[in-house]
Amino acid sequence: MKKFEDKLIAEFQDFEHEKFHVSFMPPKVFLCGGEVDIKATIPKSLRDRLITHFSAHEDELHDSRIQAEDFKDYFKEGAYSDLLEFETDIANIATLIVICLESAGSLVELGLFCMAPTTASKLLIIAPQAELAGEDSFIFLGPLDHIKRNNPDAVVAYPWPSSDVLEYEHIELVVGDIKQKLEKMKKTQKFSENNSAHIAFLIYDVIILAESITITEIEYTLLAFKLEIDGKTVSRLLYLLEKIGLIAHTVYSNVIYYFDTPGSTRRIKFGTDTKGRTRDSQALTMALRSAYTADNDESSKRRVLVLKSIKQIKSEMK
Protein backbone atom coordinates (compact mmCIF):
# COMPACT_ATOMS: atom_id res chain seq x y z
CA MET A 1 0.00 0.00 0.00
CA LYS A 2 2.88 2.33 0.80
CA LYS A 3 3.96 2.35 -2.85
CA PHE A 4 0.50 3.53 -3.95
CA GLU A 5 0.40 6.21 -1.24
CA ASP A 6 3.78 7.49 -2.41
CA LYS A 7 2.51 7.60 -5.99
CA LEU A 8 -0.59 9.56 -4.97
CA ILE A 9 1.58 12.15 -3.25
CA ALA A 10 4.02 12.32 -6.18
CA GLU A 11 1.25 12.87 -8.74
CA PHE A 12 -0.79 15.43 -6.81
CA GLN A 13 1.71 17.44 -4.77
CA ASP A 14 2.52 19.87 -7.61
CA PHE A 15 -1.09 21.06 -7.95
CA GLU A 16 -2.17 24.23 -6.13
CA HIS A 17 -5.71 24.12 -4.76
CA GLU A 18 -5.88 27.93 -4.97
CA LYS A 19 -6.11 27.50 -8.77
CA PHE A 20 -8.93 24.95 -8.69
CA HIS A 21 -12.44 25.58 -10.02
CA VAL A 22 -15.48 23.54 -8.99
CA SER A 23 -18.30 22.45 -11.32
CA PHE A 24 -21.85 21.97 -10.02
CA MET A 25 -22.95 20.14 -13.16
CA PRO A 26 -24.55 17.65 -13.65
CA PRO A 27 -26.93 19.28 -11.18
CA LYS A 28 -28.13 18.16 -7.78
CA VAL A 29 -31.44 19.65 -6.57
CA PHE A 30 -32.09 19.61 -2.81
CA LEU A 31 -35.88 19.47 -2.44
CA CYS A 32 -37.27 20.54 0.96
CA GLY A 33 -40.85 20.84 2.17
CA GLY A 34 -43.76 18.81 3.48
CA GLU A 35 -44.46 15.15 4.07
CA VAL A 36 -43.78 12.53 1.40
CA ASP A 37 -45.78 9.28 1.35
CA ILE A 38 -45.36 7.10 -1.73
CA LYS A 39 -48.24 4.87 -0.59
CA ALA A 40 -50.79 7.71 -0.38
CA THR A 41 -53.49 7.88 -3.08
CA ILE A 42 -53.35 11.68 -3.00
CA PRO A 43 -49.92 13.28 -2.47
CA LYS A 44 -49.51 14.65 1.06
CA SER A 45 -47.76 17.90 0.10
CA LEU A 46 -46.55 20.03 -2.79
CA ARG A 47 -43.13 18.45 -2.41
CA ASP A 48 -44.76 15.01 -2.68
CA ARG A 49 -46.52 16.13 -5.89
CA LEU A 50 -43.26 17.43 -7.35
CA ILE A 51 -41.48 14.15 -6.64
CA THR A 52 -44.32 12.20 -8.27
CA HIS A 53 -44.27 14.51 -11.30
CA PHE A 54 -40.47 14.28 -11.64
CA SER A 55 -40.68 10.48 -11.56
CA ALA A 56 -43.31 10.37 -14.30
CA HIS A 57 -42.29 13.24 -16.59
CA GLU A 58 -38.88 14.78 -15.75
CA ASP A 59 -36.04 12.25 -15.86
CA GLU A 60 -33.26 14.80 -15.31
CA LEU A 61 -34.95 16.39 -12.30
CA HIS A 62 -35.81 12.94 -10.93
CA ASP A 63 -32.19 11.79 -11.21
CA SER A 64 -30.82 15.03 -9.73
CA ARG A 65 -33.18 15.18 -6.74
CA ILE A 66 -31.84 14.98 -3.18
CA GLN A 67 -34.15 14.58 -0.16
CA ALA A 68 -33.14 14.72 3.48
CA GLU A 69 -35.06 11.45 3.96
CA ASP A 70 -32.47 9.68 1.81
CA PHE A 71 -30.05 10.23 4.71
CA LYS A 72 -32.28 8.88 7.50
CA ASP A 73 -29.47 6.68 8.84
CA TYR A 74 -26.98 9.57 9.13
CA PHE A 75 -27.08 9.52 12.94
CA LYS A 76 -27.02 5.74 13.31
CA GLU A 77 -23.99 5.43 11.03
CA GLY A 78 -22.17 8.10 13.02
CA ALA A 79 -21.59 10.28 9.97
CA TYR A 80 -23.19 13.32 11.62
CA SER A 81 -24.08 14.21 15.18
CA ASP A 82 -25.47 17.65 14.29
CA LEU A 83 -28.60 18.04 12.14
CA LEU A 84 -27.65 21.56 11.05
CA GLU A 85 -24.20 20.45 9.89
CA PHE A 86 -25.85 17.60 7.99
CA GLU A 87 -28.35 19.84 6.17
CA THR A 88 -25.69 22.48 5.49
CA ASP A 89 -23.45 19.91 3.78
CA ILE A 90 -26.33 18.74 1.57
CA ALA A 91 -27.21 22.34 0.70
CA ASN A 92 -23.58 23.19 -0.09
CA ILE A 93 -23.28 20.27 -2.50
CA ALA A 94 -26.56 21.11 -4.26
CA THR A 95 -26.74 23.17 -7.44
CA LEU A 96 -30.21 24.43 -6.44
CA ILE A 97 -32.17 24.35 -3.17
CA VAL A 98 -35.96 24.29 -3.59
CA ILE A 99 -38.01 24.94 -0.43
CA CYS A 100 -41.77 24.40 -0.49
CA LEU A 101 -43.01 26.48 2.45
CA GLU A 102 -45.50 24.02 3.90
CA SER A 103 -44.13 22.68 7.19
CA ALA A 104 -42.38 23.77 10.36
CA GLY A 105 -39.23 22.07 9.09
CA SER A 106 -39.28 24.03 5.85
CA LEU A 107 -39.43 27.30 7.82
CA VAL A 108 -36.35 26.21 9.78
CA GLU A 109 -34.58 25.36 6.50
CA LEU A 110 -35.57 28.74 5.08
CA GLY A 111 -34.02 30.52 8.06
CA LEU A 112 -30.89 28.38 7.94
CA PHE A 113 -30.19 28.61 4.21
CA CYS A 114 -31.16 32.24 3.58
CA MET A 115 -28.56 33.47 6.07
CA ALA A 116 -25.63 31.30 4.94
CA PRO A 117 -23.53 32.95 2.20
CA THR A 118 -22.75 29.60 0.52
CA THR A 119 -26.44 28.72 0.09
CA ALA A 120 -28.46 31.98 -0.08
CA SER A 121 -27.82 32.43 -3.81
CA LYS A 122 -28.98 28.87 -4.54
CA LEU A 123 -32.51 29.25 -3.18
CA LEU A 124 -35.86 28.93 -4.92
CA ILE A 125 -38.72 29.40 -2.46
CA ILE A 126 -42.20 28.20 -3.44
CA ALA A 127 -44.64 30.03 -1.16
CA PRO A 128 -48.40 29.55 -0.66
CA GLN A 129 -50.24 32.43 -2.33
CA ALA A 130 -52.94 32.62 0.37
CA GLU A 131 -50.41 32.79 3.22
CA LEU A 132 -48.60 35.73 1.66
CA ALA A 133 -51.87 37.63 1.46
CA GLY A 134 -53.03 36.67 4.99
CA GLU A 135 -52.82 38.68 8.17
CA ASP A 136 -50.03 36.47 9.55
CA SER A 137 -47.93 36.95 6.43
CA PHE A 138 -45.15 38.62 8.47
CA ILE A 139 -44.00 35.08 9.37
CA PHE A 140 -43.07 34.62 5.72
CA LEU A 141 -42.45 38.14 4.49
CA GLY A 142 -39.43 38.98 6.66
CA PRO A 143 -37.16 36.19 5.39
CA LEU A 144 -38.64 36.32 1.87
CA ASP A 145 -38.06 40.06 1.51
CA HIS A 146 -34.47 39.53 2.66
CA ILE A 147 -33.98 36.88 -0.03
CA LYS A 148 -35.67 38.90 -2.80
CA ARG A 149 -33.52 41.96 -2.15
CA ASN A 150 -30.45 39.98 -3.19
CA ASN A 151 -32.10 37.49 -5.54
CA PRO A 152 -35.33 38.88 -7.07
CA ASP A 153 -36.38 35.67 -8.85
CA ALA A 154 -35.80 33.42 -5.83
CA VAL A 155 -39.42 33.51 -4.59
CA VAL A 156 -42.53 32.33 -6.45
CA ALA A 157 -46.09 32.03 -5.11
CA TYR A 158 -48.85 29.62 -6.16
CA PRO A 159 -52.26 28.48 -4.91
CA TRP A 160 -51.57 25.48 -2.70
CA PRO A 161 -52.84 22.00 -3.63
CA SER A 162 -55.77 20.54 -1.71
CA SER A 163 -55.05 17.45 0.37
CA ASP A 164 -58.39 16.02 -0.82
CA VAL A 165 -57.98 16.51 -4.58
CA LEU A 166 -55.64 14.52 -6.82
CA GLU A 167 -55.47 17.08 -9.62
CA TYR A 168 -53.25 20.15 -9.24
CA GLU A 169 -53.44 22.34 -12.32
CA HIS A 170 -50.40 24.47 -11.42
CA ILE A 171 -47.86 21.63 -11.21
CA GLU A 172 -46.33 22.11 -14.69
CA LEU A 173 -45.87 25.84 -14.06
CA VAL A 174 -44.18 25.16 -10.71
CA VAL A 175 -41.87 22.66 -12.42
CA GLY A 176 -41.21 25.22 -15.16
CA ASP A 177 -40.05 27.73 -12.53
CA ILE A 178 -37.68 25.13 -11.06
CA LYS A 179 -36.20 24.32 -14.48
CA GLN A 180 -35.84 28.01 -15.34
CA LYS A 181 -34.10 28.76 -12.03
CA LEU A 182 -31.80 25.76 -12.45
CA GLU A 183 -30.80 27.00 -15.91
CA LYS A 184 -29.80 30.37 -14.41
CA MET A 185 -27.74 28.94 -11.57
CA LYS A 186 -24.02 29.59 -11.42
CA LYS A 187 -22.39 26.41 -12.69
CA THR A 188 -18.85 26.93 -11.38
CA GLN A 189 -17.15 28.37 -8.30
CA LYS A 190 -13.58 29.13 -7.35
CA PHE A 191 -12.36 26.43 -4.96
CA SER A 192 -12.44 27.24 -1.24
CA GLU A 193 -11.00 24.94 1.40
CA ASN A 194 -13.69 26.27 3.77
CA ASN A 195 -16.58 25.00 1.62
CA SER A 196 -17.52 21.42 2.48
CA ALA A 197 -18.94 20.80 -1.01
CA HIS A 198 -15.67 21.79 -2.64
CA ILE A 199 -13.75 19.36 -0.43
CA ALA A 200 -16.35 16.65 -1.16
CA PHE A 201 -16.04 17.15 -4.91
CA LEU A 202 -12.23 17.09 -4.66
CA ILE A 203 -12.45 13.76 -2.83
CA TYR A 204 -14.81 12.56 -5.57
CA ASP A 205 -12.31 13.54 -8.28
CA VAL A 206 -9.51 11.72 -6.46
CA ILE A 207 -11.69 8.60 -6.28
CA ILE A 208 -12.39 8.80 -10.04
CA LEU A 209 -8.71 9.20 -10.86
CA ALA A 210 -7.50 6.50 -8.45
CA GLU A 211 -10.20 3.97 -9.51
CA SER A 212 -10.02 2.27 -6.10
CA ILE A 213 -8.86 3.99 -2.93
CA THR A 214 -9.01 3.70 0.86
CA ILE A 215 -9.87 6.48 3.29
CA THR A 216 -6.25 6.63 4.49
CA GLU A 217 -5.05 7.07 0.91
CA ILE A 218 -7.62 9.84 0.40
CA GLU A 219 -6.26 11.62 3.48
CA TYR A 220 -2.70 11.35 2.13
CA THR A 221 -3.85 12.82 -1.18
CA LEU A 222 -5.52 15.78 0.53
CA LEU A 223 -2.26 16.43 2.36
CA ALA A 224 -0.48 16.33 -1.01
CA PHE A 225 -2.84 19.15 -2.05
CA LYS A 226 -1.74 20.95 1.16
CA LEU A 227 -5.21 20.58 2.66
CA GLU A 228 -5.44 19.53 6.31
CA ILE A 229 -8.85 17.86 6.54
CA ASP A 230 -9.51 15.76 9.65
CA GLY A 231 -10.53 12.13 9.33
CA LYS A 232 -14.03 12.69 10.72
CA THR A 233 -14.75 15.27 8.01
CA VAL A 234 -13.45 12.96 5.28
CA SER A 235 -15.69 10.15 6.62
CA ARG A 236 -18.82 12.30 6.65
CA LEU A 237 -18.17 13.63 3.13
CA LEU A 238 -17.66 10.08 1.84
CA TYR A 239 -21.03 9.22 3.42
CA LEU A 240 -22.58 12.24 1.69
CA LEU A 241 -21.08 11.38 -1.72
CA GLU A 242 -22.30 7.81 -1.40
CA LYS A 243 -25.82 8.85 -0.42
CA ILE A 244 -26.20 11.15 -3.44
CA GLY A 245 -25.07 8.35 -5.72
CA LEU A 246 -21.67 9.62 -6.85
CA ILE A 247 -19.56 6.91 -5.20
CA ALA A 248 -19.88 3.42 -3.72
CA HIS A 249 -17.65 1.14 -1.68
CA THR A 250 -16.71 -2.50 -1.42
CA VAL A 251 -14.84 -4.54 1.18
CA TYR A 252 -11.91 -6.66 0.03
CA SER A 253 -10.33 -8.78 2.76
CA ASN A 254 -10.86 -6.41 5.71
CA VAL A 255 -10.27 -3.12 3.85
CA ILE A 256 -12.91 -0.69 2.51
CA TYR A 257 -12.24 0.61 -1.01
CA TYR A 258 -14.15 3.52 -2.53
CA PHE A 259 -14.90 3.88 -6.24
CA ASP A 260 -16.97 6.14 -8.49
CA THR A 261 -20.34 4.98 -9.83
CA PRO A 262 -21.00 4.55 -13.59
CA GLY A 263 -21.44 7.76 -15.57
CA SER A 264 -19.11 9.77 -13.35
CA THR A 265 -18.01 13.25 -14.39
CA ARG A 266 -15.12 15.06 -12.74
CA ARG A 267 -16.08 18.16 -10.75
CA ILE A 268 -12.72 19.91 -10.24
CA LYS A 269 -10.65 21.67 -12.87
CA PHE A 270 -7.09 21.54 -11.54
CA GLY A 271 -5.47 23.97 -13.97
CA THR A 272 -1.70 23.98 -14.42
CA ASP A 273 0.61 22.67 -11.73
CA THR A 274 3.70 24.38 -10.33
CA LYS A 275 5.74 23.01 -13.24
CA GLY A 276 3.38 24.53 -15.82
CA ARG A 277 1.87 21.18 -16.76
CA THR A 278 -1.78 20.46 -17.52
CA ARG A 279 -2.51 16.83 -16.65
CA ASP A 280 -5.63 15.23 -18.10
CA SER A 281 -7.65 12.51 -16.35
CA GLN A 282 -6.29 9.64 -18.42
CA ALA A 283 -2.65 10.63 -17.82
CA LEU A 284 -3.19 10.88 -14.05
CA THR A 285 -5.06 7.56 -13.87
CA MET A 286 -2.40 5.75 -15.90
CA ALA A 287 0.35 7.22 -13.72
CA LEU A 288 -1.39 6.01 -10.56
CA ARG A 289 -2.08 2.60 -12.08
CA SER A 290 1.63 2.18 -12.84
CA ALA A 291 2.29 2.01 -9.08
CA TYR A 292 0.86 -1.52 -8.93
CA THR A 293 0.68 -2.96 -12.46
CA ALA A 294 4.45 -3.11 -13.01
CA ASP A 295 5.22 -5.24 -9.93
CA ASN A 296 4.20 -8.67 -8.70
CA ASP A 297 4.44 -8.20 -4.93
CA GLU A 298 1.50 -8.93 -2.62
CA SER A 299 0.22 -5.34 -2.30
CA SER A 300 0.32 -4.86 -6.09
CA LYS A 301 -1.55 -8.14 -6.67
CA ARG A 302 -4.16 -7.09 -4.11
CA ARG A 303 -4.71 -3.74 -5.83
CA VAL A 304 -5.06 -5.40 -9.26
CA LEU A 305 -7.62 -7.87 -7.89
CA VAL A 306 -9.52 -5.12 -6.05
CA LEU A 307 -9.78 -3.13 -9.28
CA LYS A 308 -10.95 -6.24 -11.16
CA SER A 309 -13.63 -6.80 -8.52
CA ILE A 310 -14.74 -3.16 -8.70
CA LYS A 311 -15.03 -3.27 -12.49
CA GLN A 312 -17.35 -6.28 -12.14
CA ILE A 313 -19.46 -4.47 -9.53
CA LYS A 314 -19.70 -1.36 -11.74
CA SER A 315 -20.77 -3.42 -14.76
CA GLU A 316 -23.67 -4.78 -12.68
CA MET A 317 -24.67 -1.26 -11.56
CA LYS A 318 -25.34 0.02 -15.10
Image (spheres, rainbow, N blue to C red):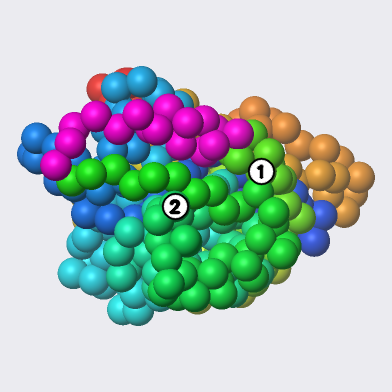
Q: Quadrant of residue 144?
A: bottom right
> In percent of the image, x 89 and y 49: which residue is there?
275
Looking at the picture, tell me which residue is in the foreground, 256 or 304. 256
Indicate left or right for 24 with 39 as reference.
Answer: right
Q: Is residue 105 magenta?
A: no
Task: Give how far across and how far down residue 251 sits, in percent.
Answer: 24, 48
Provide the residue designation for mark 1.
185
> Circle 2 sits in a helix, a strand or a loop, which is it?
helix
Residue 235 percent location from the top left of the image: 39, 65
Q: Is residue 207 above or below residue 68?
A: above
The magenta span reads 164-180
- Where residue 147 appears, as percent x and y from the top left, is 63, 64
Whether residue 177 appears in magenta in the rendering, the answer is yes
Residue 122 bears which disc, if any? none
Residue at 34 percent across and 37 percent down: it is 50
Q: Is residue 146 visible?
A: yes
Q: Who is closer to the viewer here, 254 or 228?
A: 228
In the picture, the quarter occupied by the C terminus is top left
Name of the residue lying farthest toward the bottom: 82
Secondary structure under badge 1?
loop
Q: Amino acid at mark 2?
A: Gln
Query: Which quadrant would residue 108 be assigned to in this image?
Result: bottom left
